[in-house]
Image (tube, rainbow, N blue to C red):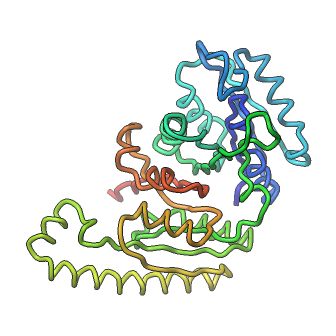
Amino acid sequence: MFRHLLVPLDGSRLAESVLPVAARLARQDNAALTIVHVIERKAPSAVHSDRHLVSADQAAAYLEEVARRPALEGLTVRTHVHTAEVKDVARSITQHTEELAPDLVVMNTHGRGGARRLLFGAIAQQVISLGQTPVLLLRPNEHAEPGTPGRGSTPPLAAAPWRTILAPVDGDPAHERGLPLAADMALDFHSRLHLLMVVPTIGRLAGFQAAAAMLLPGATRVKLEMEIAGAREYLLQRSEELRRRGVNATGEVTRGDPARAIARAARRLSADLVVMGTHGRAGTDAFWAGSVAARVVARTRTPLLLVPLREEPDAG
């Protein structure tokens, strides 16, 4: 499934909190693990309450120390320092996904509010919108006291089996390119894969559909009921296909706003992971304003595996 994982580290314990999960994935598939640090131009003296790495020698020594930690013992661990100072660390990490060719990037969202927006918007969004590499986003443990062992860890993934994987689908194959990856992970970890389709209510329709609902509310309700029936049939077919592969697949149809419905389902199912596709969109502000994936991140602590979606080239 995974052959090579990339983990960007900035020297902070928060960034390091993804290492147990990355190690577990690498160990499961006998994959290589590359830990990378980018030297930031005019870097602050501290990052997330930890000393910032401001020289190539500091960064190289730090990455070598991380590579020798017990959590990574027995794995093929490579280190990489981008020694030339850069102003845009996020874009540099994005470029490293092309240079080092990982098939998964693992990072956390660095907490609440502005910091989370900074990391997710400036790094993960660029990796998704500019590259082809899936990104696994983890949430740090925000309840641990500073300086305590395991601060920033993610116990549900680091210490327990991945029991339930939630995969939102919408019936469009172009939007479901993350589903084969979710199925492979479910097989690897003997997990339940739960498919979720969200059909909007009248109040959640937008644009032309909303205008049509105002003019023809009865016809719109009938159309939505037909969509629910079609969604159930679609889920039944996809679940049966997955079960023939040996996947423990289930499915459900729900109503409402997609991001809210996905977050609710993740909580209700105690999902260990949500796998979904995203177009990434051009520009951080556009991504945060309109992306279902970004709104899911804002509403749940469940880890999220984002798979970039790309337009198919025209045959002609």
Q: Nearer the viewer, residue 251 or 26?
A: 251
Q: Nearer the viewer, residue 130 or 222?
A: 222
Q: Is residue 295 left or right of residue 155?
A: left
Closer-to-camera residue (214/10): 214
In front: 92, or 232?
A: 232
Left or right placement of residue 27 versus residue 298 in this view: right
Residue visible at 44% across and 52% down in the picture: 295
Residue 148 is situated, as x and y percent measured from the top left of the image, at 80, 38
Q: Disc count in the image?
A: 0
Q: Quadrant of the C terminus?
A: bottom left
**Which residue is painted at 15% across and 82% down in the image?**
218
Residue 194 to residue 121: above or below:
below
Q: Is residue 150 left or right of residue 172?
A: right
Q: Is residue 16 above or below residue 43?
A: below
- The residue sitting at the left extreme is 215
The quadrant in which residue 165 appears is bottom right
